[in-house]
């Protein structure tokens, strides 16, 4: 029997569907983009590069990815759209050939105390089902193993209709959850140090409270002094038990205080609700300092930090409880799951094994599933998000990555490159914003933005192949093959910072002397224990100024002037010259335009449709009342000052009538970190990741302290900007400071006076010092992975 031949339907002409092989962008004007037009090939790997602030994220995330997501959201019903974030249409003339965009960015995974690596990746959900099926003794459904579900029970009478009559029946119910009742699934309990809340030797009328915002005479204070529940003239230590309970713990109670109906509440629950329930990073610095002083976090004594009930920990598979499984290093857990042979749950085991092996493959095998999600670095968070896409069957999708090599040792970058190429080879379009030459080198297509940052950027300088970029005259092309040379002479230390017996996370009883008065670099593969050593083991009395990678939080009302504290001296200078109150020169206070409340734009809510923001007609986007703009300093009003760049403002406040030394010092630091192009009033929401980190660095440089600890300061920095950063680090050291840098960038390693290399591997294969010495000695020895890569980098 002959097989029927399939007719050849291919025509010599190109099929109409195959002509849509480009993403076309015409006239993009988001943020600082200046009518940008590009054509991006589909099913290829395209890298977007350029100096920090040149407009890469504005083009890739705020234009292409944002429009793709907006169009997908519009396919849902108006009712469903009402529950989704509303996305405005980007400022662009034409966007053509878009496909579904999946964004894998560096945003930290929500730092909810109950969010862990296991809950974020669904690995915990699969483990819970596994233990509910195979665990001995059997204790219940998957909920019994969840630290987010509390055990509850109840009973009562219910009325049911039966045979035409209403009958009352007694019913009871119970839900067995896995949440530890003592810590409520958080793994730690908080203790409030009462000595930080008040001085018990004083009475309330003698200003006993020392909590921010509880000033004598203010409403927060009068609530207690005029409640009638305690004697305001009696020292707190002499209160009776009843008075102390009313003062500290009383439940919310409605009462008349100073003739006004108010709710009285004990001091501790009131402080817990107003301060301790908030995200620490979003607090003002003085409130954050108070919380750090007043609250101590200790491991929950009932569950020993596992978050789970005794029952959940008693059920085991092959001698391992779910708490043990979550505490294991993921590479070990994957091996344990591989050894389970149970046909009744075979599909579940296969799915769990695939997820765990994806962790190992992506270089995160050193994590454990119980690791809190908020403690992951930006690079780790991004790779955790990648895990759910690795095994995906979707094709013809646009994957958008934001510097996927952040936090990766040169040894790990090759692995990340392989993953990006794998996603592309499945038929997907991969768009990557990146600075590392190792990743730019694997691109099929490169788009270089610039030539400068901020207002000096926003144009396409080059489009084409990597070879074309190398030969082109752009900033990226010129610096592509840059190599920092090893120092001929290194500085001599002026002292040492001793760390003894460090055991934080995976550190294996480490003793190390970090030299002071020099540029010291701590390096090693991802997960080798660098942050545990530097952030978790340095003695508390070392007067360390730490600049880590936690993101800057801020609304569009926040800007570089408000964040750095620069606006304070500027407002005072305006007030002094014009003989008025400083509050007039704040767009968040008395000087705000009444129409837009100082926002500069008016938002029109269109219910389930995307809201519209239009420039305020009253103040023309200047944010201030017209009367405030009549006051001048050095011939400029406050809105003109906020429109200045850091470089202009530095000159303006440096001399003449406007000379303000306090403002000039802050502007000097901003220029030092390479942010001279930023405007003082630019909303923080429009800054790139690299710009935000340098803004934080500039702010902390004014703090008192002799030791700076910087966590990967090259994050988000272009090759050309790394040179400027090295100059800044040199200036800090030459000014008598000690600088300790946790870093993977070979240029920073080569420039160091001293290198401490951790390893040799990640997780329990790391946590040891594998080298201490000068960069030249490390290159000569080539005894570690870092040594080999640094030697290749300096072409030794």
Image (spheres, grey):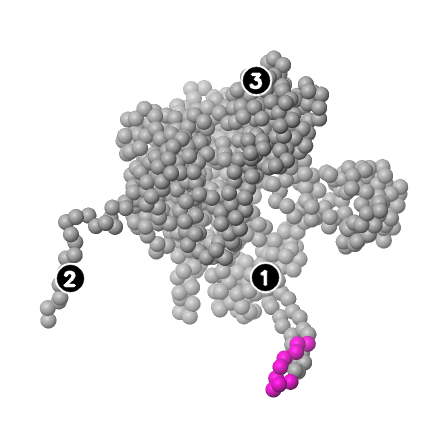
Image: 760 above or below 781: below
Residue sitting at the far bottom: 163
Q: Quadrant of the N terminus?
A: bottom left
Q: Is residue 463 visible?
A: yes
Image location of residue 80, percent across then percent down: 49, 56
Question: Is 163 in the magenta?
Answer: yes
Q: Is residue 109 visible?
A: no
Chain part drawn in magenta: 157-165
Mark nearer the N terminus (2 vs 1): 2
User: Of the residues tagged 2 and 1, which is closer to the observer?
Assistant: 2
Mark nearer the N terminus (3 vs 1): 1
Q: CA distance from mark 2 to mark 1?
A: 58 Å
Identify the residue shown where x is 68% and y is 74%: 156
Which residue lies under the disc numbered 2?
6
Residue sitting at the far front: 617
What predominant SS class does the magenta segment belong to? Answer: strand
Residue 670, quarter of picture: top right
Image: 83 above or below 654: below
* Disc 3 and disc 1 in contact, CB within 8 angstroms: no
Under tag 1, what secondary structure? loop
């Amino acid at each position: 029997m002959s097989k029927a031949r399939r007719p050849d339907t291919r025509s010599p002409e190109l099929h109409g569907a195959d002509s849509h092989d480009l993403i076309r962008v015409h006239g993009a004007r988001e943020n600082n983009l200046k009518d940008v037009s590009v054509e991006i090939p589909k099913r290829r790997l395209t890298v977007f590069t350029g100096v920090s602030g040149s407009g890469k994220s504005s083009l890739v995330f705020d234009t292409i990815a944002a429009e793709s997501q907006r169009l997908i959201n519009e396919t849902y019903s108006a009712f469903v759209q009402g529950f989704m974030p509303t996305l405005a249409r980007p400022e662009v003339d034409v966007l053509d050939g878009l496909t579904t965009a999946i964004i894998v960015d560096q945003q930290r995974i929500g730092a909810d105390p109950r969010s862990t690596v296991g809950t974020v990746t669904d690995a915990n959900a699969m483990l819970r089902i596994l233990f509910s099926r195979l665990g001995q003794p059997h204790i219940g459904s998957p909920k019994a193993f969840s630290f987010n579900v509390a055990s509850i029970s109840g009973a009562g009478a219910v009325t049911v209709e039966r045979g035409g009559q209403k009958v009352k029946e007694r019913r009871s119910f119970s839900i067995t959850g896995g949440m530890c009742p003592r810590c409520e699934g958080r793994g730690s309990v908080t203790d409030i140090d009462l000595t930080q809340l008040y001085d018990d030797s004083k009475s309330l009328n003698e200003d006993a409270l020392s909590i921010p915002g509880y000033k004598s005479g203010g409403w927060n204070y009068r609530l207690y002094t005029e409640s009638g529940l305690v004697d305001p003239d009696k020292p707190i230590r002499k209160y009776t038990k009843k008075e102390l309970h009313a003062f500290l713990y009383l439940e919310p109670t409605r009462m008349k205080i100073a003739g006004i109906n108010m709710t009285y509440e004990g001091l501790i629950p009131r402080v817990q609700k107003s301060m301790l329930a908030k995200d620490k990073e979003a607090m003002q610095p003085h409130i954050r300092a108070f919380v750090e002083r007043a609250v101590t976090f200790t491991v929950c004594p009932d569950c020993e930090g596992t978050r789970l009930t005794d029952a959940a920990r008693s059920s085991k598979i092959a001698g391992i409880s779910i708490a043990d499984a979550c505490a294991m290093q993921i590479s070990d857990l994957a091996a344990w799951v591989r050894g389970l042979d149970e046909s009744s749950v075979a599909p579940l085991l296969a799915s769990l094994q695939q997820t765990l092996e994806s962790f190992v493959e992506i270089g995160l095998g050193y994590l454990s599933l119980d690791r809190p999600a908020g403690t992951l670095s930006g690079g780790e968070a991004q790779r955790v998000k990648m895990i759910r896409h690795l095994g995906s069957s979707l094709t013809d999708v646009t994957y958008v990555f934001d510097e996927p090599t952040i936090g990766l040792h040169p040894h790990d970058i090759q692995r990340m490159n392989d993953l990006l190429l794998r996603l592309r080879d499945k038929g997907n379009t991969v768009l990557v914003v990146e600075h590392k030459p190792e990743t730019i080198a694997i691109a099929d297509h490169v788009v270089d933005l610039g030539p400068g940052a901020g207002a000096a950027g926003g144009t396409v300088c080059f489009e084409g192949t990597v070879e074309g970029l190398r030969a082109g005259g752009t900033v990226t092309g010129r610096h592509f093959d840059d190599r920092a040379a090893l120092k001929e002479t290194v500085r001599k230390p002026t002292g040492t910072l001793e760390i003894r017996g460090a055991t934080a996370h995976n550190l294996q009883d480490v003793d190390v002397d970090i030299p002071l008065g020099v540029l010291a670099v701590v390096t090693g593969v991802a997960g080798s224990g660098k942050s545990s050593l530097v952030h978790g083991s340095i003695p508390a009395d070392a007067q360390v100024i730490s600049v880590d990678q936690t993101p800057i939080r801020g609304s569009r009302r926040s800007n570089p002037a408000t964040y750095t504290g620069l606006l304070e001296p500027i407002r005072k200078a305006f007030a002094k010259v014009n003989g008025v109150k400083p509050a007039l020169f704040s767009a968040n206070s008395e000087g705000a335009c009444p129409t837009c409340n100082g926002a500069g734009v008016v938002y029109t809510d269109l219910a389930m449709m995307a809201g519209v923001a239009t420039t305020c007609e009253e103040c023309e986007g200047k944010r201030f009342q017209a009367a405030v703009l009549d006051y001048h300093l050095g011939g400029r009003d406050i809105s003109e000052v906020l429109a200045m760049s850091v470089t202009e403002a530095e000159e303006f406040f440096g001399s003449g009538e406007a000379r303000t030394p306090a403002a000039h010092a802050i502007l000097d630091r901003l220029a030092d970190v390479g942010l001279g192009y930023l405007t003082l009033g630019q909303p923080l929401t429009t800054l790139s990741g690299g710009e935000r980190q340098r803004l934080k660095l500039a702010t902390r440089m004014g703090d008192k302290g002799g030791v700076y600890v910087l966590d990967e300061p090259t994050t988000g920095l272009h090759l050309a900007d790394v040179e400027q950063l090295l100059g800044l680090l040199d200036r800090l050291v030459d000014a008598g400071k000690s600088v300790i840098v946790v870093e993977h960038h070979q240029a920073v390693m080569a420039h160091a006076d001293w290198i401490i290399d951790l390893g040799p591997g990640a997780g329990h294969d790391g946590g040891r010092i594998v080298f201490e010495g000068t960069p030249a000695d490390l290159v000569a020895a080539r005894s570690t992975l870092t040594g080999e890569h640094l030697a290749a980098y300096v072409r030794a």
